[in-house]
Image: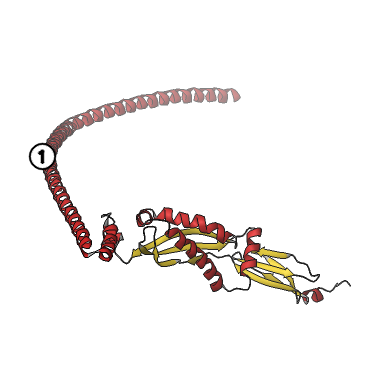
Amino acid sequence: YYITNNLSVANMGNIVTVGPHECCIVSGGCCGTQGKSYVIGGWAWAWWCVSQVDKISLRVMTLTPSIVSVETKEGVAISCNGVAQVCVMKEPQMLEFAAEQFVGKNQTDLEDIILQTIEGHFRAILGTMTVEDIYSDREGFAKNVRAIAGPDVSKMGIRIISFVIQNITDNVDYLKSLGVKRAAEVKRDADVGVAKSTAESGIKTSEAERQHMEAKYSCDALIAENKKSYEMKQAEFNQEVNKCKAEAELAYELQAAKENQTIKEEKMQIEVVERRKQIDIEEQEVQRKEKELECLKKAPAEAESRKVMILAEAHKTKTLALAGAEAAAIKLSEELKRTRLRLLVRLRQSR
């Protein structure tokens, strides 16, 4: 039987979509297949009635493993808090492990399972280390927890992204007295001495008090020595600072004197330049007045001379013009006379 109607196909199943932070697990099928389909950030087809759809979150989960009053290698009860960042791995094999372990469980149950696993390894590793090692090398302690707990949680498809130690505390102030190495031994010996005999307890107590006083006096002497060294260094530093200040003030005064001298020299240069400019201006004014005086005296004479020359030239031109006109008139009169004679001769001949 073949279905050709798209609507009929759509009515036989659903399209399931998931974001990049989820994994969709589709199991079963219309033919009873045993295979599973894992889809991250995409879509999958699920047949009605014969397919099962489950989802697992791939988001980072923040867990806070905490252990209280767990004895270390030396028998000191301490409490530790940590922060672990874990997530479901995306590799196909790891997704299959995670699906087998966590499908059907809510997020709280999933986090509780991982938290209990990490806390179990946390507690076991803590019992193999000393307080000094734990307190001085937190990173090494956290690295051991990751290295040992990592393979176990990976069998459930979980990866430990990071694990850090937040707080380390104790109820006997052991961490505060790490500088006195035998504090825990003195307390333990005192407890054992009370069980054996009061005398031995008194001896141990006296010994502890003596060691305490020796340590105190040693610390007081070291503090006094350090204070003396500090005061000497402080005095040397103050002397050096005062010396530097005096040198700086002297250098400032010298520099100020140089600057003042430079300013005075510049002012003198400016005054010299101004005087030179004033002299140049005065010389130019003298030259201008000389030229103005020269023009006032020489210009009328030249104008008179030019006037005379022009009048002479005009008279000459006039004289030449008159002479030319008289010559032309005489020539014209002679010509008229000759013409008149010719006419008279012709007139007589015609008669």
Residue 199 location (% of width, % of height): 20, 62
Residue 136 location (% of width, % of height): 35, 53
For the C terminus, the quadrant is: top right
Q: Is residue 162 above or below residue 268?
A: below
Query: In the rendered image, is residue 14 in sight?
Result: no
Q: Secondary structure at mark 1?
A: helix
User: Seen in the image, is 42 located left or right of residue 321?
Assistant: right
Q: Nearer the viewer, residue 6 or 79?
A: 79
User: Seen in the image, is 51 located left or right of residue 57?
Assistant: right
Please rate how many residues cluster around mark 1, counting C-alpha atoms within 10 Å: few if below 14, some from 14 to 19, many from 20: few
Residue 342 location (% of width, % of height): 53, 22
Q: Is residue 338 above or below residue 38?
A: above
Q: Nearer the viewer, residue 206 or 285?
A: 206
Residue drawn where x is 51% and y is 67% of the image: 116
User: Seen in the image, is 135 located left or right of residue 157?
Assistant: left
User: Seen in the image, is 264 located left or right of residue 323?
Assistant: left
Residue drawn where x is 42% and y is 66% of the image: 67
Residue type pointed to by label 1: Leu
Q: Quadrant of residue 96?
A: bottom right
Residue that badge 1 annotates: 250
